[in-house]
Image: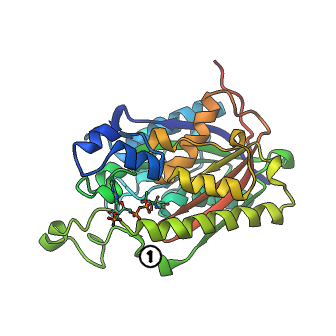
Amino acid sequence: MYAALRSIGAYVPKNVLTNADLEKMVDTSDEWITKRTGIKTRYIADEDESTSDLGVQAALKAIERADIDKNKIDMIICATISPDYFCMPSTACMIAKKLEIANVPAFDISAACSGFIYALASAKAFIEANMAKNVLVIGAEKLSSIVDFTDRTTCILFGDGAGAAIVSATNDKNEAIIDINIAADGKYYDYLITPGCGTNKPCSEEVLKERACFIKMKGNETFKVAVKTLTNDVVEILEKNSIESQDIDHFIPHQANYRILNAVANALKLTPEQVVMTVSKYGNTSSASIPMAMNEIYEEGKLGYGDLLLLDAFGGGFTWGSALVPFAGKPLDK
Ligand code: ACO
């Protein structure tokens, strides 16, 4: 049994936050943000919209586009670092409740910006082990809840959103996910961290005063490791599978910073047409960024059945991952 990527969907909240808006909040400028990150806008969820709400909207599109009865879904995996609830219940359980899908395994994956690839790898493994047939894989984030809007080094980077896919069992090797590589190195744990409100430093007045429940990042150091790791990771997966970079139809990297994406694309000698870049519009949406970018080219009519995708992600942990995936979904009915 093989695993095939049958559909993609995404949801973007309605509130846009521009660089001009951020100029009014912290000491920054549109020029600095554009030059250093390529980001122009990001979208922010409503106060009463939680991560599972974003995930549900993306999932409904993925379910419809896969043309599958939701009752045939036998596993729900949600990658997120901004869950609805601290510890429990999982955001996957909240999504299952809202979609009215009961009696199937539902769980979260915490792998920061690599979360979607980790979730895809899990779906593939469960299907190949004959433990699931139709897995709903979601990357959903309400990062605006864990971003410190007084910290100019991080608040300009992140946005909210969700992406979802249906991964199903198939006997046809031609449409099977070819390979997925996932890895981590915990020695970098404090380069990208929410230091407070976990068991290491439980919530207290001091933690709140230090704003320690928000994302802290050693940006420059993270940047350097990100470029090197993202490049090595894709070179390795291409070599291992004897695939040349020119055979890739769409390179979909995690959307953190256009400078990181350009450096990786140049190292692989990819043409601009091969590289999917949505960071200017959505900012960094962590585990949602790859499925949101995939959805973007799907809705633009650029993603067709059989197109070969190369996914590449890097994030807090540090975690990273890459995947070679033929798109096995139907084109969008316009
Ligand atoms: N506006 C104006 N100036 C700023 C801002 C801002 N928003 N932020 C920082 N600066 C200043 C700094 O204070 C510093 O000033 P100084 O030289 O006087 O000390 C100067 O700009 C340069 O700061 P750097 O941090 O060196 O800037 P850099 O070029 O590295 O860009 C950035 C920062 C955009 C964060 C970059 O390092 C980056 O993209 N890092 C990687 C992010 C990433 O890949 N994360 C992984 C995934 S995310 C996840 O897993 C959730």
Q: Secondary structure at mark 1?
A: loop
Where, by quadrant of the figure, is residue 220 drawn? Answer: bottom left
* Residue 118 visible (yes or no): yes
Q: Residue at point 59% right, 64% down?
A: 227
Q: In front here: 52 or 38?
A: 38
Q: Residue at x 56, y 36 (%)?
A: 9
> On the image, which quarter does residue 273 sit in?
top right
- Specify the farthest residue to the top: 334
Under mark 1, the amino acid is: Tyr
Indicate whether 323 appears above or below 247: below
Give coordinates of residue 229: x percent, y percent.
62, 68
Q: Quadrant of ligand 1?
A: bottom left
Classify 222 as above or below 334. Answer: below
Q: Position of residue 154 (x, y in %)?
A: 35, 57
| Residue 45 higher or lower than 169, as above or below | above
Q: At which x and y percent is residue 292?
A: 54, 41
Residue under numbered circle 1 = 189
Q: Residues within 10 Å of mark 1 (few under 14, many from 20)?
A: few
